Image (tube, rainbow, N blue to C red):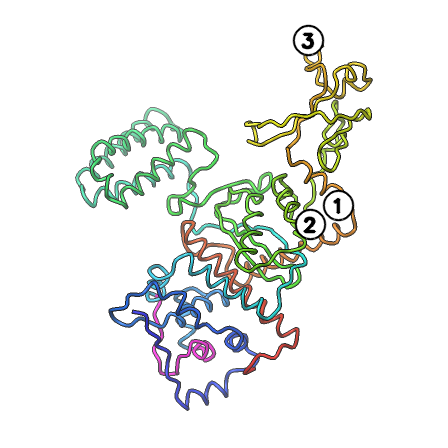
Amino acid sequence: MLKKTKGQLDLFDYMIFEKLIPKDHLLVKIDNIIDFNFVYDMINDRYSSLGRGSKDPVMLIKIFLLEYLYNLSDVKVVKRIQTDIVFRWFLDLGLNDSVPDDTTLSHFRVNRLKEEHYEKFFNEVVLKCIEYDLIKTNRYIIDSTDVEANTNYPSEKKLARSAFNKVLKEVSKFNEALSVKLSNEIELEIDEEYEKNAKVSWRKHFEITLKYLNLLYIKTYDELQNNEKYIESFGICYDLLFQYTNKKADKIVSIVDPDARVAHKSPGNIKRGYKNHIIVDEDSEIILSSSQTPFNVGDQKKLVELVQNTEERFKLIPDEISADKVYGSTANRAFLMDNNITSNIALYKERDTKRDYFSINDYVFSKDLKTVKCPNNIKTSKFKIKYQKKPHNREVKVFEFNPKHCSECPLIEKCIYKMKNGRFASSGKKLIVNSRYDAVINDRDRVNTEAFIAAYNKRYKVERRFATMVRNHGLRRCRYVKLAGAKKHITMANIACNIVRMVKLLNNQNFIVPGI
């Protein structure tokens, strides 16, 4: 049952707090700026109307905030509350009130709070920033940073063995004899392989593991119909074996955290874990929306979601969007153009090498993408719209030039591909472009302007937010496992960053906060 159990501060408590707590302390400013009573409505659905009274959820939420404001663990924050006067004041705890222990915090986080509650908390902070008129709609910046998963990454052999051992652990709960028997048998078979060969490949390990996993499927079929924990461990093991043996790009890299993923951020720079995708108001540097994904999810896939979430939740539509060139997919550029949002996204530079054939940049398109002029100044308005399944699953325009003009053109050998037999691949040039290439044309006209350069150079502001969260709010490594845990951790870091930023902005504006 939800219960408000705020401590009853007596006169002595007030005198001590008044004497020792500085009026300009961060927590004093936060307490006067944000009314945390919204938490009661936010969390009410997670409590029964009957039963024993719980710890005050506002106090517990504030404790979680303290953890991320000061980069503390559950154990460390409890110890700090016991001795820190301002922490107690912030939590409405008197000097003689008891402090929740770390197991209470863990229980509340696991059993009471869901992903949507963290998102609601984040939204309330942004709404408070809007209320104080801190957020503008001039220009927003989008970017992402990596966040390490809270796990180690074993080799393929150890990964397969760990996955199978986890399956056997669940089997032992309902059939210990079978678990022990298969554990001994797989160990013996792997040892026999090492007796035959000094080195045994990971593929052989996977082959043996799959053999015993299939055996388990037959012997424990009934349990696999309703035993949720067994189903989960079995599924992870099977998926892992399938992904690696079939050379899938999206692979499990940890049994402890099966949602974490690996990708190459740049040549030789391997990252593992998750990403924090954010959209930031350039003027205030307040984070307006975020999305958390495994690390192998491309940044460009989140631009539309972040912009739409900001509009749906806060009715905020920017005049401009700035982002790194990786966000410059044709679909993203088209989305921004269609929504009258100016794009400050750079274009990839063409490789500075000698080319045997003209590139698409050597052709001049009309802004409405209805005509195109070739390097020999021949224009065509003849095109067909087709759906190209491979490699991009996209709708394209196929412009066709008159074969007669092409056959007489002195530039034909740089325009139409010449096959090994000496013949040209087609009688007339066919130029294939994305059906929304008009958005690329629109952006290409802007990238060399002073306005674009000035906006693009302001992207350091989003990097500053990431640096602050890594340095002060524990963003670098997740505290919890799986994607759901990563979402909670990263969202709390975003919240802490926004709250500190809000306090700083209000102070810089000489904003008078009641009570300060």
Residue 100 in the magenta stretch? The answer is yes
Mark number for residue 446? 1
Q: Main secondary structure of the magenta part?
A: loop
Which residues lie in the magenta part? 84-102
Q: Which residue is mark 3?
A: 421
Q: Is residue 469 above or below residue 218?
A: below
How far, Cα to Cα, is label 3 from label 1? 43 Å
Q: As rendered, which of 259 and 307 lies closer to the eye?
A: 307
Q: Name the foreground residue: 439 vs 362.
A: 439
The answer to whether the residues at label 1 and label 2 have Cβ atoms under 8 Å apart is yes
Name the N-terminal-most of marks 2 and 3.
2
Disc 1 to disc 2, C-alpha distance: 9 Å
Q: Quadrant of residue 311?
A: bottom right
Distance from label 2 to label 3 (Cα)?
48 Å
Of tags 3 and 1, which is closer to the observer?
Answer: 1
In the image, is residue 125 above or below residue 411?
below
- Rendered image quadrant of residue 264: top right
Give the vertical position of 439 relative to 45 (above or below).
above
